[in-house]
Amino acid sequence: MKVLIATNETQGDHPGDYTWTVEGELVTPVTAECCSPATCGCGRGFPGLASCRATTTAMVVERPDLDPDEVWEALYDSLSRDGWADHLDDTEFEALVDEHLWCIETVCSSFPVGTVVSRWGTKVYSRQVSAAA
């Protein structure tokens, strides 16, 4: 399955880059943003499912060891640890997990494996890597 992972590749190429995730951990393009995402950086981060921390760089990778059900479970566990299940009933919480999985699948279907991506709000875009002539 194609998924997004935290990467240090191209990290620091853009002003305001940050990474507090674990290299290679699964990340999601969905996040709750504060009232000033441009100031704090939450509008640019990919939350890590294991570390519960964020990074501004993610990579599309093929993980044949994972299937959608396993990624769904990882999302469920992460969002539960972050307290989202405390504020939603079971149906609403499962819909939230479904939305995260759908967003991951949508982003990954839009880019080839190996693409480093960034985000701003709901937009995910490829980071162009400059090549020498």
Image: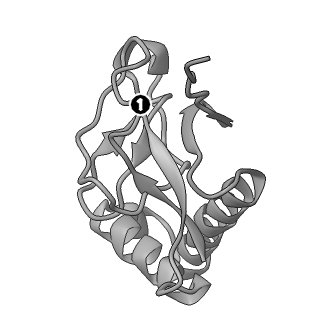
Give the residue drawn at x 57%, y 24%.
Answer: 131
Residue 44 is situated, as x and y percent measured from the top left of the image, at 48, 29
Task: Name the residue carrying label 1.
Answer: 10
Give the residue drawn at x 52%, y 75%.
Answer: 89
Between 92 and 74, which is closer to the camera in this rendering? 74
Give the residue drawn at x 69%, y 54%.
Answer: 112
How is the protein colored in the picture?
Answer: one colour
Taking the image as shown, residue 75 lies to the left or right of residue 124, namely: left
* Residue at the farthest front position: 133
Above or below, 46 relative to 99: above
Between 115 and 101, which is closer to the camera in this rendering? 115
Count residues near mark 1 (Cα–Cα under 10 Å), then give few for <14, some for 14-19, many for 20+.
Answer: some
The mark tally for this picture is: 1
Residue 40 is situated, as x and y percent measured from the top left of the image, at 35, 19
Above or below, 69 relative to 24: below
Taking the image as shown, residue 95 lies to the left or right of residue 8, namely: right
Q: Looking at the figure, which quarter contains the N terminus?
A: bottom right
Residue 7 is situated, as x and y percent measured from the top left of the image, at 37, 47
Above or below, 88 relative to 108: below
Helix, strand or loop at mark 1: loop
Above or below, 121 relative to 29: above
Give the residue drawn at x 23%, y 54%.
Answer: 22
Between 59 and 100, which is closer to the camera in this rendering? 59
Taking the image as shown, residue 80 lies to the left or right of residue 76, namely: left
Looking at the rendered structure, the kind of residue marked 1 is: Thr
Between 87 and 32, which is closer to the camera in this rendering? 32
Q: Quadrant of residue 117?
A: top right
Q: Looking at the figure, which quarter contains the C terminus?
A: top right
Residue 31 is situated, as x and y percent measured from the top left of the image, at 49, 45
Q: Quadrant of residue 85?
A: bottom left
